[in-house]
Structures are given as C-alpha cells and as structure tokens.
Image (cartoon, helix red, strand yellow):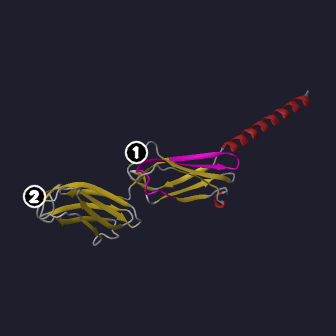
Amino acid sequence: MIKSSFKFLAMGAFLAFSLQSCSDDDETMAEGPVISGFEYGIHGEEGHTAYRGNDLHLEAEILAEANVKSISVSVHAHDLPVGDKEEEWDFEQVYTDANYLIKNPTFHEHIDIPATAPVGEYHVEIVVTDELGNSTEVDGHLDVLNPISISDVDVDATVVRGNDIHAEFMIKVVNGIHNVEVDIHAHDLPIGDGEEEWDFEMQYEEGLHEKTEAEFHKHIVVPNTAPAGEYHATFTIEDEKGNTYEYETHIDVTKE
C-alpha cells in the first residue's frame, strides 16, 4: 500500500509538472515581439505631422525572444478628397533587411511622400512578426500637410487703372522659399481707343530666398492704358525642393 501510494503521488507530481511545463511553453510561444518608442513624422502638441514632397521618418525599438522574420509598414487614408493636381496615395512595404532579422533590432526608415499626395489624416501601422509566427502591431494617425502655406492674405479686389494693386500675405515654407511668381492677365477684354492689352508676370526672390517664414508685400502698377475689366491673378510660391503652392484671385480694373 505504501509503495502504491508513493507511485500514485509520484505520477501525480510528474503529471502536474508536465502540465505546468506545457503551460509555461504555451505562454512563451504566445508572447509576441514588443514594439516600443514608435516614432513617426514630427511629434508636436497637436499630434504627428509630415509634409508632402518630403519624407516620413519612422523608428521603433523591437524586443523579441526569437529572431524577427519581417517588419511591415502601411500608410493609408480613407476617402480623402483628391484635389486638382493631386493623386491618391498609400504605402505598403515588407522589410526583410538582414539588420532587422535579429532578436532586438532598431527599425529606422524614411518613406517619401509624393508632392501630389492629398493633404489630410492618414493611418500608420507597423507589424512585427518573429520566426515563431508571433506578431505584434502598433498604429497611429498622421496629418499630411502642404509644406507651403500662406496666411493674412490682403490683395486688392478692385483698382483704378493708373494706380497700383496692393498684395500682401505671410508665407511659411518648410524647405525654404525659392521664389514667388505673380501672374496677372485677362481673357478677351475689348480694347478701346488709347488702350493696350496688359498682363503682368514677375518673379520675386529678394528678401524671400531661402527663408522659411517671410512677408510678401508688393505694389503692382496698372497702366493707364490697361483695358477695364476682370483680371485673373495667380501667386505661386515655390520652395527649394520644387514644391509649389498657388493662390488665385480676381481683380477688377476700372476706368475711374
């Protein structure tokens, strides 16, 4: 009886130990990679931002008990309006570079955002999968902005010919201002006696070139001989990377 009891106890202890070991193994197998310090874009008080025509910075620390098998990144938006000269954009890529296929890699990449990408909110996701088949994902939201913006716009809506058009606004450019081009023209205005067709084109750089913030303030003289009527005015700001931003308005030129 003593031997039988001892054998029963021993078998019970072995079974309990086996079950515990299996449980521990399951817990180990179930644990996926840990992603920490996920950085994307520029982190500010209002969230994460990036600029079209520039690159998106991505970085994360990864801890894994098994070697990493792959790291995938996706960037996409939902139903963003696509404006003139814009094209719908999303991004997906799986990274299997040798320097990432280790236990504890640091992920660091830069993704080019096309200059034609619509501005708005995008969803960013990173998924890390290890050689045991475990995977972990983290995500966030990113605001893609135009690298060029203007504010405090003050352009005359009407002007008497022989006088000047006052044009003023503040410019903010991430990559620095290359120049500002002004184009003023009309379409099929009747030309009376003593009048001459008039349009205006000029590029401005002085006091603006390479600055990230500047005030544009000009006075453009309209000749006495310019036909009266509606003119179309376009102000085009170009940055040092070739990105452009256009502001359009109409100006009525009158005789008196």
Residue 19 occupies quadrant: top right
Extreme top residue here?
A: 1
Percent across and percent down for residue 202 are 27, 68
Check disc 1 and give the amino acid type.
Answer: Pro
In the image, farthest residue toward the left: 256
In magenta, the rendered stretch is: 111-139
Q: How far apart are marks 1 and 2 (CA)?
A: 41 Å
Amino acid at dot 2:
Lys
Q: Name the residue under label 2.
A: 255
Helix, strand or loop: magenta stretch: strand
Q: In this view, does 160 lie to the left or right of 150?
A: left
- Based on the picture, tell me whether residue 84 belongs to the magenta stretch: no
Q: Specify whether 220 is left or right of 150.
A: left
What residue is drawn where x is 54% and y is 47%? 138
Q: Which residue occupies 85% across, 35% down?
A: 10
Marks 1 and 2: which is nearer the front? 2
* Rendered position, 125 above or below 160: above
